[in-house]
Image (tube, rainbow, N blue to C red):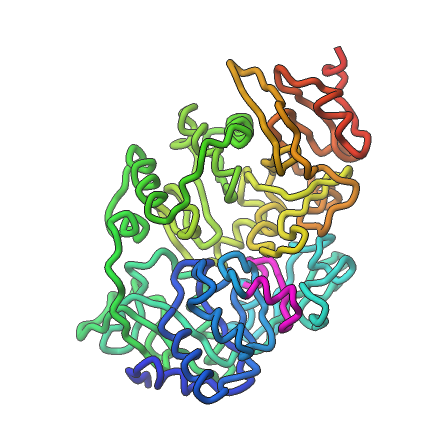
């Protein structure tokens, strides 16, 4: 039977050495009050300590002084298993200082491993991750010099086919953010942006004899509608009510509490940008890339669009009239509508549906997407892409590996080089005023996020769209298929590559 507690009382359910699983998605839906209570107790008593934290999508709030950052920095955590570290400003720096063990697994594979544990199965099989960094035959999931746990990912053979087997430690404590608890302890997520893996996390925790702690905005005396309940009260141990801070109407547009027609998507998106400081200056290379990449969209496509340069695709998809004829999706479970960006990435404006994250990755893993647009840090001659690890920094793979593993058409959107790149466009003619000092097309990439070998075996169409040209993935590696007007094929492209590429014969004339 659940009990209503203060945050400090609820945190007493956590013991030293516990494995804690969190349901947050980057910067959204974090149970901040519970994290703050953990930090208060740790500072006062030195406990709970030796914690292991598991999160499919990360649990920061874009502020290194808030949420879990404090108690992680001060030493309460021994191990983190996470899909993405981008919103955890302090933690991702500490990872590279070897302050604790840290492992990066594809977001969807963590989600499915949690669901497997909920069903009494130790782990989850997946072809996602084969031949990229997480594969034990490549690098393995450990990020730093002290992370050598080989139980998390294993390469196995099942009926003559190779898979990766993802297995997580047994979850002792679930920490969840919900909206409302009814008088039976049933938890709804009505005003939230997503439900993520909440139910699976709670089921797995209770199957292991663990404790479920839920932070809610309010408690009501009446019953919830059964179909609205995400977590039934029988799975809940502690409910902590924390009155939420008022938020601008722009954020309410992400809850699905009122209809937002297609004609208003841009208006609401601009309001969000102004509130979350994501508005950026005009990016000419990004606009060139987005305009060309958007030409690959077809009516009725099911689509995923990554953050950064890929987001410019939506601008030109709207201008061409195709945006309202495709279905956009986001990793957190949103289908339809317009995915938000910046600090509220994972939320959706005007979604048609928001379902459990594991179900979204069922769609992605099995080729349910028609096309995706992803960013990239580096590309090598073979067409392999690094999208998760830069020199001296680490964000993590997130849903990238799942999204690109089997999608029919994969479009990488990236500049030819960076750090000082200056490009102009006038009436469709491109002028490279200055090349950046850091190349994006290199002999050897830092880490493999996308395997060209696997893409060829899956017969995927893969394009690498830059501000000056387009490459495709051919049988032997990169193949130059387009050079934009105003660009010198040799001086601006071929002479700057550290390797030779095949050139489409039509470009020779």
Q: Position of residue 245 (x, y in %)?
A: 26, 63
Residue at 49% in and 87% down: 47
Q: Position of residue 313 (x, y in %)?
A: 49, 33
Q: Is 116 left, or right, of 134 in this rendering?
A: left
Q: Is there any visible trace of residue 461 in the rendered image?
A: no
Residue 99: within the magenta? yes
Taking 171 as reference, is 489 above or below it? above
Instruction: Specify the quadrant of the image occupied by residue 138.
Output: bottom right
Picture quarter with the N terminus: bottom left
Instruction: Specify the quadrant of the image occupied by residue 406.
Output: top right
- The magenta-colored residue range is 91-110
Residue at 30% in and 73% down: 186
Depth check: 61 or 108 in front?
A: 61
Residue 65: within the magenta? no
Instruction: Specify the quadrant of the image occupied by residue 408.
Output: top right
Q: Position of residue 295 (x, y in %)?
A: 53, 26
Q: Is 431 left, or right, of 262 in this rendering?
A: right
Q: Position of residue 70 (x, y in %)?
A: 47, 72
Taking 193 as reference, is 239 above or below it? below
Picture quarter with the C terminus: top right
């Amino acid at each position: 039977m659940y009990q209503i507690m203060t945050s400090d009382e609820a945190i007493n359910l956590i013991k030293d050495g516990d494995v804690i699983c969190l349901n947050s998605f980057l910067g959204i839906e974090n149970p901040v009050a519970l994290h703050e209570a953990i930090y208060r107790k740790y500072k006062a008593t030195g406990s709970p300590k030796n914690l292991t934290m598991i999160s499919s999508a990360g649990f920061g709030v874009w502020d290194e002084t808030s949420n879990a950052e404090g108690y992680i920095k001060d030493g309460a955590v021994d191990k983190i298993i996470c899909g993405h570290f981008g919103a955890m400003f302090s933690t991702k720096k500490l990872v590279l200082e070897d302050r604790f063990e840290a492992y990066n697994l594809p977001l969807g594979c963590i989600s499915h491993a949690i669901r497997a544990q909920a069903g009494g199965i130790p782990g989850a099989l997946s072809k996602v991750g084969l031949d990229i960094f997480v594969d034990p035959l490549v690098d393995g999931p450990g990020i730093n010099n002290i992370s050598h746990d080989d139980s998390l990912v294993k390469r196995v053979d099942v009926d003559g086919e190779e898979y990766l087997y993802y297995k997580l430690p047994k979850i002792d404590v679930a920490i969840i953010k919900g909206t409302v608890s009814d008088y039976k302890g049933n938890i709804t997520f009505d005003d939230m942006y997503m439900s993520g893996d909440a139910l699976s996390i709670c089921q797995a925790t209770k199957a292991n004899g663990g404790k479920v702690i839920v932070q809610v905005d309010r408690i009501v005396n009446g019953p919830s509608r059964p179909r609205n309940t995400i977590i039934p009260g029988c799975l809940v141990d502690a409910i902590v009510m924390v009155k939420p801070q008022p938020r601008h109407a722009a954020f309410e547009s992400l809850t699905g509490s009122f209809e937002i027609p297609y004609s208003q998507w841009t208006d609401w998106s601009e309001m969000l940008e102004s509130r979350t400081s994501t508005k950026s200056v005009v990016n000419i290379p990004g606009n060139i890339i987005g305009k060309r990449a958007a030409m690959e969209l077809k009516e009725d496509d099911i689509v995923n669009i990554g953050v950064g340069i890929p987001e410019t695709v939506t601008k030109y998809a709207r201008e061409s009239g195709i945006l309202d004829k495709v279905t956009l999706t986001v990793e957190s479970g949103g289908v339809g509508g317009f995915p938000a960006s910046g600090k509220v990435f994972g939320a959706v404006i005007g979604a048609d549906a928001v379902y459990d994250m594991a179900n979204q990755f069922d769609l992605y893993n099995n080729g349910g997407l028609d096309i995706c647009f992803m960013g990239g840090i580096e590309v090598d001659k073979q067409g392999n892409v690094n999208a998760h690890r830069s020199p001296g920094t680490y964000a993590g793979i997130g849903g990238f590996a799942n999204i690109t593993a089997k999608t029919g058409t994969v479009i990488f959107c990236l500049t030819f080089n960076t750090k000082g790149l200056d490009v102009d466009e006038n009436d469709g003619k491109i002028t490279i005023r200055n090349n950046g000092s850091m190349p994006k097309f290199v002999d050897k990439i830092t880490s493999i996020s996308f395997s060209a070998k696997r893409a060829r075996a899956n017969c995927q169409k893969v394009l690498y769209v830059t501000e000056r040209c387009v490459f495709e993935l051919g049988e032997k590696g990169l193949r130059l298929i387009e050079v934009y007007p105003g660009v010198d094929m040799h001086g601006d492209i071929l002479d700057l590559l550290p390797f030779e590429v095949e050139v489409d014969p039509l470009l020779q004339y």
